[in-house]
Amino acid sequence: MAEAKQIEKKAKKDAEKNQKPTLNIQPGERMRDFNARVEQEYKKNFIEAVRATKPVSQRKLKNRESRKQKKVAKKERVEQLYGGRDFDDLKDHVAFGEVADAPPTLTKIPKARGRNKELLESKTKEVTEKKEAADNKYESDEDENMKLLKASHKRKIQNMSASARKALDDERTRVIDHYRAKKAKKMVDSGLTPLT
């Protein structure tokens, strides 16, 4: 598709080149100005004619040919690696004066090509797994286990007798007081005033 357009453009250019404008002297124009205009108009043709008559050495021709072959080989290698050009048919036709409110958002996952195919597939798999985990509101198995433990702990406290619950509360307050005393001692040792 793109090649056909290129060939068409080349044919148009060749037709324009072959179509030589007829130059006439303008009324009131001096001969010197007319000659300068003619020379300027046909300058490319003169240069091409001189080049055509100049003999080109075999070495130069060989170098040109090898450069062309390298260019073609490079193009083929890139096409083989990345699967060709993707954006030939993705052109936006923007009307004059149209304002872009925000940059475009990509909603489709790009098609994997070449070497990056496996990498892209693994990344998309990871992203979907993370998304599913976020939907469950647990980031890992440990979080889920902690949630289950908390629930079972609440059930145990609710099923305890009043004396057992009081003993548990006393133990909890003793541990908290011990922690606060240790923290205050640490602050005094470092030269800070402990909070009361």
Image: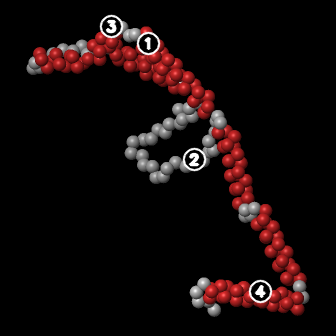
The mark closer to the camera, 2 or 4, is 4
Find residue 89 and report its horizontal and vertical position in percent: 54, 33
The mark closer to the camera, 4 or 3, is 4
Q: Amino acid at mark 4?
A: Val
Q: Earlier in the sequence, mark 2 or mark 4?
A: 2
Horizontal side, residue 79 vs residue 97: left or right: right
The mark closer to the camera, 2 or 3, is 3
Find residue 92 and report its horizontal and vertical position in percent: 49, 39
Label 3: how many Cα within 10 Å (few below 14, some 14–19, many 20+): few
**Residue under the point 89% across and 83% down:** 159
Q: Quadrant of the C terminus?
A: bottom right
Label 1: how many Cα within 10 Å (few below 14, some 14–19, many 20+): few
Horizontal side, residue 174 vs residue 65: left or right: right
Q: Amino acid at mark 3?
A: Thr
Return the residue at label 2. 106
User: What's the coloring here?
Assistant: secondary structure
Q: Earlier in the sequence, mark 1 or mark 4?
A: 1
Return the residue at label 1. 59
Q: CA distance from mark 1 to mark 4?
A: 92 Å
Q: Nearer the viewer, residue 64 or 84?
A: 64
Find residue 187 and report its horizontal and vertical position in percent: 62, 85
Contact check, label 2 and label 3, Cβ < 8 Å: no
**Residue under the point 62% across and 45% down:** 108
Return the residue at label 3. 53
The mark closer to the camera, 2 or 1, is 1
Q: Amino acid at mark 2?
A: Leu
